[in-house]
Every structure is written in C-alpha cells, then in structure tokens.
Image: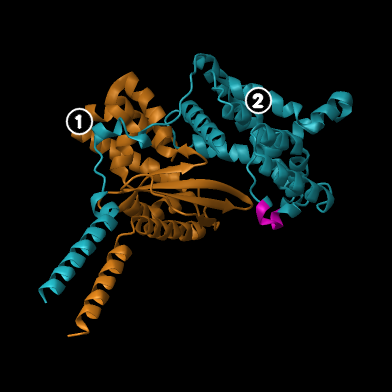
Amino acid sequence: MNSRPLLILMLLGSLLTIPRAICSPTEEADNRLKKAVGEVVAIAAHAPDRKTLSEQVKPVLEGILSFETMTRRAIGPGWRQFTPAQQQEATGLFTTLIIRTYTAKFTPGELPVETFKTASTPSPGRVEVPTTSSYNGSSYDVVYRLEESEGWKITDVVIEGVSMIANYRTQFDAEFTQGGANAVIKALNHSLSSSQ
Amino acid sequence: MNARTSILTALLAGVVFILSINCTPCYGGQRSVGAADDDTDEYSHAASIADPIEPVNRGTFWLNHQLYRYILKPLSKAYDAVLPSPVRRGIFNAFDNVEYPDRVVNDVLQWKLKRAGYESEKFVLNTVAGVGGIFKVSDHIPSLVDLPRPDTGQTFGKWGIGHGAYVVLPVFGPKSVRDTVGFAGDIALNPLFWLAFWFPSTAWLPAVSATDSARTLHDKLKAYDATTANTLDRYLAIRSAYVQNRQQAVSK
C-alpha cells in the first residue's frame, strides 16, 4: 500500500518523458533531412555523370521533397487559374526541374562535406535547418525549409540567401502575365528540353 | 483514501495538461496551407528590385553572357590548367590579405568593432606568419575562420539606404545603383588601386586583385552556371538571385 504513490509517480514520470521523445518536431525533421541528404551525398560521390546522378537521386528526393507545395508556391496566385489537368502537368514538369536544380549543387564523383547546424522552428509545423556544404576549399550556406504535411518534407532550399522557390516565382510570374497557364507549361517544357 | 484519490486525480489532470502543452507543436501545429494562403505566406515572398531600364540591362546581360562563355570561361579554364591548385590558393590568399582595409573600414562603419578586431588580428597573423598572406595561417584559429566579408554596398544597406534601380554593368554584371557606388568605394579602399594610380606600370594588380575580378572569376563563373542552369529566363533568374543574395548580406 505504501509503495503505490511511488509507483504512480514513476509511471507519471515515464509518461512525461515518452511524449517528449515523440514530440520533438525539430529533431524529427532534422533526422529525416540528414538521412535524405546523406543518401544523396553517397549517390553523388559514386555517380559517374550528372545524368546518372539525377536518375539515382530521384527516388530519394521524391520521398523528402513536397513537389506539389513547391510548384504551387513557385507559380503563385496564377495557380488558381490553372485547370486540375494543367496543375498536374505543371507539377510533373516542375518536379523534374527541381530535381535537376537541386542535384546541380553536387559534383558527380566528389564527396562534399555537409555540416548541419542547429535547426530552428520559425512557426509551428515549420523547421529550418541551416547547413554548410564544402567542396575543394569552397563552401556555401544552404538552408532547408521543411514543413509538416503527411510527414516532414522540404518545401524550399535556400542557397546563399537565394530561395529556389522565390527565384522560380519571378520567372513564372513573367510567363503567366504574358500568356497564362499555357505559357508557363510551354516555358517549363522548353527549359527541360534545352537543359538536358 | 478519498483524499488520496483526489490528489492523484488532480496530479493526473495536471500531467495531462502539461502533456497537451508539450505536444502542441507536434499534434496541433501541422500546417495545411492551400493556394489561397500562399498569397500571404512569408515563404512565398522574396526581395525584389526596380528595373526601369530592363531592355538596356537585357542587352548588356546578353553581351556579358557571350563574354563569359567565349572569353572568360576559356581563360578561367586555362588559368586552372596552368597553375596547380596550391599556387592558385596562395595567389588568392595574398590578394585577399591585401584587401584588409576594405574589410576593416566597413566593419567599423557597420559598428562591428569586435569583428574589426578579429580582422586586424587575422591580417597581422597572415602577413607575418603567412609570408605576406600567401599562407592562411588564421584558418587554424577558430575565431578567425569564416569571418563575414563586408563591402561598402552592404554598409550602405545597413545604414538603411535602398537599392535604387537594378543595373547590369558591362563585364562586372548585376548591381544596384547603391551597390555600384559601393563597388567604387571598395576599389578606393583597395591599396593596390592607389599603387596603380601612382605607378601606372602596376595597373594589372588591382585588375587581378579586386573583388569582381580575375581572382574570383572561377567561383563567380561556377555560381553563374549554377544559377542560370535549368531556368525559364536566365536574366530574371540572375536578377532575383542577386537581390536575394544582397538582402542576406545586409541582414547578416
């Protein structure tokens, strides 16, 4: 009878620690990112050329990048004027472009040093992980923006202060203003065919 | 017994309350951002710049692109092929060391006195122990590694001066009016410029040493290639990258 309060306190103590272990969004996002970047780096180190690199990292990036959010934000307000079919087509095309743009920061056959700094939570459901990528003495800052929606996924990559999404948005805005959704899709197709 | 049960119930209720607070970011913070929310979302916006002379800028940009592609890129490759990496690094370090006045003056103008102190320490160390700055001895001291590199345009930005219009300079590429004036300031703070001013035979020195010059050509071409690959409009991609990058420099 005397040991009951002690047992209850121990039970409560353990209850307090378990959710803390589960409920660390920053840590969860951070770990997920580290795993994905680690896989990409390992693939890049052994890839013979850029085309192989893009093909091999595709499954990894498909699991960690939120292509729909990225496409929607890059296109901006014009997105609402796209038909569902156009939205699907634009997302598919932009996915390929994002994979190529992201893998362009890796050199096939070379092993970069990726340093992860302390992640921050700018607002609930969002985590920013600052990193430094070093290649042959040159290094640059990369911030990964992750958001929680069906698991933690990257919604933007900011290299040396330059947001990938904001950069594309400037370009999409100009295309959309000139010729609407069709002009955006046409420009995406053109960019993909010319950068192959 | 009843009193004990009440205390335990209260304790449990307290624990449940604490847990609910702890779990808020995890269970209650999930975002569901739709297209309509994106318009006001902070992640959907980026710095922009006025471009009133866009047709002229696009023309200069096209000329620079040809210059980079057909002249500067082959030159950069030849430079890399002829000089081994340690020699290139030594040249880079020595010229970088000479640019100390530009960095320290801007540190002081930005009221970053501690950083100015580190910068001076780094200069003395590299000049004396690094044989005129050829060897970057300061890389072995954690507090002197990766010191931010201030420039005059950044100082103007920190003072609250806006960009003004966007301009594409021949050869030097993208700038704003503010950063063009700042760029002139950086040149004026380069001791080699004054050496060349008084001794014209050394005019090649600032051309090699200054920021935005042959010394940094390799890295700049690499950055240019990375930014313009996979784009819909390379002019807009560079303009957006420039203004975002400068905004980050000013906010540091």
Quarter occupied by the C terminus of chain A: top left
Residue A148: x and y in percent read 29, 50
Tell me which corner region of the image, top left, top right, bottom left or bottom right, holds residue B37: top left
- Residue type, numbered disc 1: Thr
Mark 1 chain: A
Q: Give the vertical position of A196 relative to B137 (above or below).
A: above
Q: Give the vertical position of B30 relative to B179 (above or below).
A: below
Is residue B18 visible in the rendered structure shown here? yes
Provide the letter of the chain coloured orange. Answer: A
Quarter occupied by the N terminus of chain A: bottom left
Residue B145: x and y in percent read 66, 51
Q: Viewer-nearest of labels 2 and 1?
A: 2
Q: Which residues are magenta?
A: B139-143
- At x 88% / y 28%, what residue is drawn? B201
- At x 74% / y 48%, what residue is drawn? B122
- Residue type, numbered disc 2: Gly
| Tag of residue A83 | 1
Q: CA distance from mark 2 to mark 1?
A: 47 Å
| Chain B drawing hue | cyan
Q: Is residue B34 left or right of residue A134?
A: left
Q: Is residue B73 left or right of residue A84?
A: right
Is residue B83 visible in the rendered structure shown here? no
* Residue picked out by circle 2: B182
